[in-house]
Image (tube, rainbow, N blue to C red):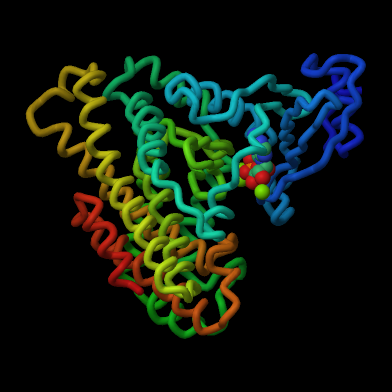
Amino acid sequence: DFKSEYFTMSEEDVVRYVKTEMDFFDSNEQLSCKEIGDGNLNYVFRVKGSSGKSVILKQAGPVARISNEFKVSPDRNRIESEILRIQGKLAEGFVPEVYHYDPVMNCMSMEDLSDYTIMRDALLKKETFPQFADHITTFMVNTLLMTSDVVMNHKDKKALVKDFINPDLCEITEDLVFTEPFFPSLRNDVFPALQHFVEKEIWGDEKLKLETAKLKFEFMTNAQSLIHGDLHTGSIFIKKDATKVIDPEFAFYGPAGYDVGNVIANLTFAYMNGAVTMKDQQSREDFLHFIEQAIIDVIDLFKSKFEKAWQQHASDQTAAYEGYMEYYLQNILRDTAAVAGCELIRRTIGLAHVKDLTSISEEEDRAAAEKACLTAGKTFIMNRESYSDGTAFFKVISDAI
Ligand code: ADP
Ligand code: MG
Ligand code: MG
Ligand code: MG
C-alpha cells in the first residue's frame, strides 16, 4: 500500500506504483524498471512501457546514499519537484517536465531525458558544446534575477523564502563546502601525493581560513535569489543543441553567485583533466579552447543578459538609482569567484570528489591537476573582489596549470 506509509521502493515496487498510482501508461502495457541513480543521495528509476514510452521516478531515501551519516529530510523531494516547476516557468525548456509529486512516498516523476548525456560524462569523453554557455546563462539569469527582490514584490518573495527553507541540505553545503575542506576533518579524502601541499597551503593558511568563515556566513544569511544550489556538471543533461538542468534539491534563497561559481568550477575540472590527460596536440588544443571560451562566455553572457533583464524587469524604485545595478552585479561576480574557489578545493580534498580528477590514472598527472585546482581555488577566494569579466576569471585557471 503506497498511500499510508513511506518505505524505500525496489524496482518491483516502482512498477506496481506506476501501475496503481499514476495514469502515465495504458493499463495493458508491459512495464520494465531499472534503478539508474548514480548520485550521492537518492534513488532514480527508469520505467519503460512496451509501447516505447518511458518515465523517470525519483525517490528520496531517509539517509544519503553516499553515507548514512547524513540524515536528510525526504521533504527535499517536495522542494525538488516544486523548484523544477518554478524553474520551468522562469526558464522554459531548461528543466525536465514534472508529472507528479507524492508526499507520502517522497517521490516524483518527470520527463525521461535518456536521449541526453550527463555533462560531466560528455566532457570526460571530450565532447564539446558550443551552445552551452548561452543556454546556462539564460537559465541562471532567468532563475536568479527574476526571483530576487530587484524584480519580485518583496512580500511575495519572502513567502517563497519561507517555502524553501532547506535546513538539512544547507547543512551539507555549510559542512562539506565551507567548513571541512579547510581543516584536517576525518571526512576529507586527500590524494596522498598532495598531503604536504594541503597541510601547508590550505590547512596551514590562516588568512584563507578567515575568508572561508566570511563566505560561509554570507552563504547562510544572504537570501538573494532562489538558487539551484548544486549546479555542477553532474546536474546538467546536455546534447549539441539543448541543455537541461536537473536535481535542484539543494535549492533555497541564497547568494546568486553560488550557482554561477559552481558552473565555473566544474568547467575548470574538465579543463584540468584535458590539460593533463590529452596527448594528441590538436584535439587537446580544440578541447581546451572550447572550455576556455565556455568559461569566458558564462561570465560575459551572464553579465550582458543580467543587465538587459534588469533594464526590462527591475521593479524596486531604489534599484534604479544610478550605479546600483553595477554594484549589485559586481557583488555577484565576487561571490561567483569565491564559490568557484570553494568548490575547486572541496571537490579536490573534501568528502565528495569529481570523476574529472579521480579518473586520471597517472599519479603525477592527477597530482598536477589537483594542485592546479587548489591553487586556482585559493586565488579565487583571496582575490575575489578583482574579477569583472570572463577573461579575468579564465586567467586564474590558465595561470594555475
Ligand atoms: P541525486 O540527487 O541522487 O544526485 P540525480 O537527480 O542527480 O540524483 O540523478 C541521478 C542520475 O539519474 C543522473 O545522473 C542521471 O543519470 C539519472 N537521471 C536523473 N534524472 C533523470 C531524467 N529526468 N532522465 C533520465 N535520467 C535521469
Ligand atoms: Mg548517469
Ligand atoms: Mg545529482
Ligand atoms: Mg541531488
In the rendered view of the protein, which quadrant contains the N terminus?
Answer: top right
54 lies above or below 126: above
Q: Is residue 72 visible?
A: no
Using the image as rendered, state which of residue 180 and residue 86 is in the foreground: 86
Q: Position of residue 9 (x, y in %)?
A: 85, 36
- How many numbered discs, if any? 0
For this orientation, the residue located farthest to the left is 322
162 lies above or below 132: above
Q: Residue at x 50, y 67 (%)?
A: 348
244 lies above or below 148: below
Q: Quadrant of ligand 3?
A: top right
Using the image as rendered, state which of residue 34 and residue 254 is in the foreground: 34
In the rendered view of the protein, which quadrant contains the C terminus?
Answer: bottom left
71 lies above or below 14: below
Q: Position of residue 268 (x, y in %)?
A: 41, 60
Q: Is residue 67 visible?
A: yes
Left or right of 232 in this view: 146:
left
User: Image quadrant of residue 320?
Assistant: top left
Q: Position of residue 110 (x, y in %)?
A: 67, 27
Q: Residue at x 85, y 31 (%)?
A: 14
Left or right of 41 in this view: 266:
left
User: Image quadrant of residue 16?
Assistant: top right
Using the image as rendered, state which of residue 231 and residue 77 is in the foreground: 231
Q: Residue at x 73, y 22 (%)?
A: 102
